[in-house]
Amino acid sequence: MRHAPATLRNREPILNVLKQVLPHRGLLLEIASGTGEHAVFMAPELGELFWQPSEMDGAVLADIDERTITAGCQRILPALQLDVTAATWPLSHADAVFCCNMIHIAPWAAAESMFTGAARLLRPSSLLILYGPFRRHGVHTAASNAQFESWLQGIDPRFAVRCLDNDVIPLARANGFELADIVAMPANNFTVIWRRC
Ligand SMILES: C[S@@+](CC[C@H](N)C(=O)[O-])C[C@H]1O[C@@H](n2cnc3c(N)ncnc32)[C@H](O)[C@@H]1O
């Protein structure tokens, strides 16, 4: 099975935030599940909440499912293929949406589509939670994030560490989300929580 080493470092701090804010039941959609390692670590700790993994890359869905079946958590659903930029999404409702480390490693259109799609799924007062590196007021929060962005842009010039204040918060607001909290995380990352208006 594939392994993303960063998940071992960030999973516990992220889970601590999720435990404080998520509802104890209902359905959480995870966008860009990657290896599924966050799902298997977090879902068993989140009460009766069902966890719906998803991935743009259909080739990794079986790998995510193998990991979740091996973990034995009954509340992790079979992974869905979801490219946030697709015109239709494979589900019509969620009680929360979580997306970790995606909007910097995708074109800006993916961020735009993610907010638009999440707005369609969520009822008023439901949460959308993003985790990752962000610029604040246009400025990198650490030299390592600037280096990371140079590396990202070597892969694809459309990728970038997004500016929370200048770009992401206005995009969220335009899609009907009010900012609920910004939590500083280890390694110069943030967990950002929005509430659907
Ligand atoms: C750095 S990985 C993060 C994976 C996982 N969330 C984690 O933290 O380990 C970025 C993920 O974003 C996904 N991704 C990129 N563009 C996407 C899109 N348009 N729709 C959905 N997922 C996308 C990729 O498939 C990849 O799994």
Image: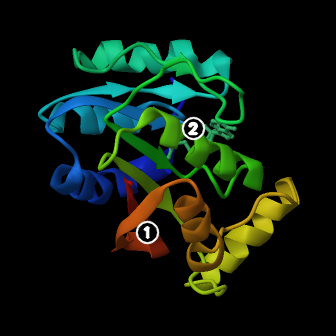
Q: Which mark is residue 138?
A: none
Q: Earlier in the sequence, mark 2 or mark 1?
A: 2
Residue 16 at what x, y percent from top left? Answer: 21, 56
Where residue 4 sits: x, y (%)? 51, 42
Helix, strand or loop under label 2: helix
Query: Is residue 103 toward the left or the right of residue 193 in the image?
Result: right
Residue 13 sits above or below residue 41 on the image: below
Q: Is residue 5 above or below residue 69?
A: below
- Pick the residue in front: 1 or 14: 14
Residue under the point 31% across and 35% down? 95
Do labels 2 and 1 touch, CB within 8 Å?
Answer: no
In-image side of 109 versus 113 (left or right):
right
* The C terminus, quarter of image: bottom left
Q: Residue at x 50, y 40 (%)?
A: 118
Circle 1: element type:
strand
| Position above or below: 165 against 154 | below
Query: How has the structure been colored for display?
Result: rainbow
CB at disc 1 and ligand 1 closer than 8 Å: no
Q: Which residue is mark 1?
A: 190
Q: Residue at x 31, y 14 (%)?
A: 70
For label 2, the residue is 117
**Could you say where residue 110 lies in the image, as x and y percent from the top left?**
70, 46
Whole-angstrom CA distance, mark 2 to mark 1, is 22 Å
Nearer to the camera, 31 or 152:
31
Image point (84%, 58%), residue name: 158
Q: Position of residue 156 (x, y in %)?
A: 86, 54
Residue 67 image-quadrant placement: top left
Q: Amino acid at mark 2?
A: Gly
The amino acid at mark 1 is Phe
